Image: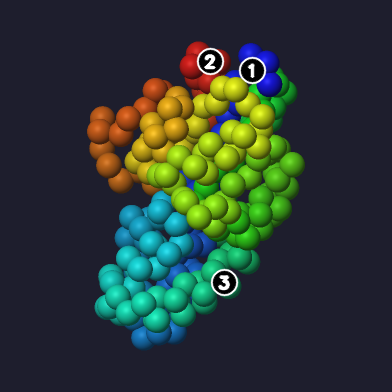
Amino acid sequence: MGGMIAAIFDLDGTLIDSAPDIHAACNAVLAEAGGRTLSLARMRDFIGDGAPALIRRAMAEAGLGRDDALHARLLAAFLDRYERAVDLTRPYAGALAALDRLARAGHPLGLCTNKPIAPTRAVLAHFCIADRFGAIVGGDSLPQRKPDPAPLRAAMRDLHADRCIFVGDSEVDAQTARAAGMPFALFTRGYLHAPLAETPHDAAFDDWTTLPGLIEALA
């Protein structure tokens, strides 16, 4: 891939704010099971480790316990709703324009998310941005999920890239980049739960117009 560095992105909390759709879909299945519904702010605390972890945490918070059979049923019901949940999701301001700038500059682009692949492809299609990515790895594309580095390395291989930077918003993304030995740019307006100073990163940004310059500097 020559000397041009590739950029691989997380999705939820990085390129898009999908928490309102996740919140609505999860609360619907909790309510159907007789559980308490959760606030949007609390639901944001559960995002980042994939759908199974989200549902397990939400069940405990909603007073539904930790029964494995119930978890499997609620997870299936959530994923059924989640695959079509795009109406409340919005791209972060400037994110899609930054992708276009990077692509025009010749940077290969990839996606590495813990969001299951079906809702990932649904939201990419909704915003007509699937064709921007030469690699798309979802949370169930491999046996491993972030913070295991395997999904990030798979995206890098799919891009045929020698050098990559990972762009994400959470401590999970930071851990993934570190495990993969890859530079990490942290978007600070996403779903970060840990203090910024305690989250390893090579660059941090809250304005998407600055990202192409940061990537050039890190390259």
Distance (Cα) linking label 2 and label 1: 8 Å
Looking at the image, can residue 34 be seen? yes
Q: Earlier in the sequence, mark 3 or mark 2?
A: 3
In this rendering, the label closer to the viewer, 1 or 3: 1
Distance (Cα) linking label 3 and label 2: 40 Å
Residue type (three-letter) at the residue carrying disc 1 = Met
Q: Are marks 3 and 2 in contact (CB under 8 Å)?
A: no
The residue under the point 44% across, 33% down is 180
Residue type (three-letter) at the residue carrying disc 2 = Ala
Along the viewing direction, whichever of 73 and 31 lies nearer the viewer: 73
Q: How is the image coloured?
A: rainbow
Residue 155, position in %: x, y?
A: 59, 38
According to the picture, the residue beneath numbered tag 1 turns out to be 4
Q: Earlier in the sequence, mark 2 or mark 1?
A: 1
Mark 1: give few (<14), some (14-19) or many (20+) Cα within 10 Å.
some
According to the picture, the residue beneath numbered tag 2 turns out to be 219
Q: How many marks?
A: 3
Mark 3: give few (<14), some (14-19) or many (20+) Cα within 10 Å.
some
Q: Earlier in the sequence, mark 1 or mark 3?
A: 1
Judged from the image, the secondary structure of the residue bearing numbered disc 3 is: helix
Residue 194, position in %: x, y?
A: 27, 42
Give residue 81's mark. 3
Picture layout, residue 165 above or below residue 116: above
The residue under the point 32% across, 60% down is 42
Residue 81, position in %: x, y?
A: 57, 71
Would you say 21 lies left or right of 178 here?
right
Picture layout, residue 145 above or below residue 55: above
Q: Are marks 2 and 1 in contact (CB under 8 Å)?
A: yes
